[in-house]
Image (cartoon, rainbow, N blue to C red):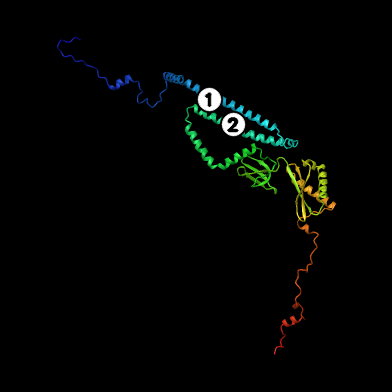
Amino acid sequence: MTAAPGADVHLEVPAVSLSAVLSADDPSPTPSESGTPRVPTLQDAHESATNAAGWVEENWSTWLAIGLRVLLILVIATVLRVVVRRAITKLVDRMSRTGQAVDGSGLGGLLVNVERRRQRSQAIGSVLRSVASFLILGTAALMILGTFQINLAPLLASAGVAGVAIGFGARNLVTDFLSGVFMILEDQYGVGDTVDAGVASGEVIEVGLRVTKLRGDNGEIWYVRNGEVKRIGNLSQGWATANVDVTVRSDEDPERVKATLTEVAEKMTKEEPWNELLWSAIEVLGLDSVLLDSMVVRVSAKTMPGKSLTVERELRWRIKRAFDATGIRIVGGATALEDVEAADPTAGMAAPSVYSSTVSPQSMAASPLPPGTVK
């Protein structure tokens, strides 16, 4: 259509509603369809897969490096643990096989208790293996946590504070444990030994890292904390000494007494089972002391550990019979007054008083007058 020049031109545009425009541009569901879930399309799955592939492509090298580092730490820790435990086992086996003489004599070989050394070596090996495993695996765990970029400073600080608190609270327990470890390492005593621990004495029935059990002479069981033992005497290591002191009259012939004791000692040394319990010849050491009315002769011998009392009792028994046979008198205590004549039992009594006689003038003067005689 052609308009004349100078004429007004009016264009008529059809009215289009805003809702229609929005409906044409955005194919969103109508309010009636908003309640139903939207089903993902193939395009959505493709986009998700693309995003995941891109994220993996960006981070795969980091995760691979972390995995290889963790694997390397585990392999090194496992190999190191096996090597250390095997070295400890070989060291323990060598300790159990090695026998050291005590004094370089033939007696030294008899003093090595093979079973005792084996038990001590196993205990030491168990403690060392446990400590080595704890240190190696604990260090590996901390390194793995550090590989994952975990801040270990708070963990280590908390562990340090907790360790200090536990150390102060359980210092007695730590002391007992360390004392038990050193007792086992130094072989201070073992099961079956007779010890004097100061606070208690008896036979060791169990050795632990914290508590040692002792059975007393009367059958009681003592539980002794290792940290409380300040000094200990082992009566079963090496050898024991049997000492017998014989007290005789001072006028006895010393040579005769010595000859009798020597004969008893030689006879006892050759008899069973005393020849096994005695680890040296019984020696008459000589006069231990000389008094006005007596003299003491000492007899001594080395015995198997823990058998000194048995040897002493038997030796006293034989010496008493031998002295009775030879007429040598043993004195001491109340028996030293055996030859003293008994005193007259009436020697210490006072003379009878004149008042004891009813007819004496003194008694008559002191007696009351009969009734009716006073006027």
- Determine the residue located farthest toward the bottom in the rendered image: 375
- Determine the residue located farthest toward the left in the rendered image: 6
71 versus 219 height, above or below: above
Residue situated in front as seen by the camera: 273 or 333: 333
Residue situated in front as seen by the camera: 358 or 146: 358
Answer with left or right where residue 201 lies relative to residue 158: right
**Crowding at label 2, few (<14), some or many (≥20) Cα neighbours within 10 Å?**
some
**Mark seen at residue 330:** none
Q: CA distance from mark 2 to mark 1?
A: 21 Å
Report the residue marked by disc 1. Answer: 70
Which residue type carries mark 2?
Ala
- Mark toward the start of the polypeptide (2 vs 1): 1
| Quadrant of the snapshot with the N terminus | top left
2 vs 1, front mark: 2
Residue 347's x, y, as percent?
A: 77, 68
Report the residue marked by disc 2. Answer: 132
Answer with left or right where residue 197 lies relative to residue 5: right
Which residue type carries mark 1?
Val
Residue 206: quadrant of the picture: top right
| Quadrant of the snapshot with the C terminus | bottom right
SS at mark 1 in the image: helix
Residue at x 57% of width, y 43% of height: 172
4 versus 36 height, above or below: above
Residue 165's x, y, as percent?
A: 51, 40
Residue 145's x, y, as percent?
A: 50, 29
Residue 54: quadrant of the picture: top left
6 versus 366 height, above or below: above
SS at mark 2 in the image: helix
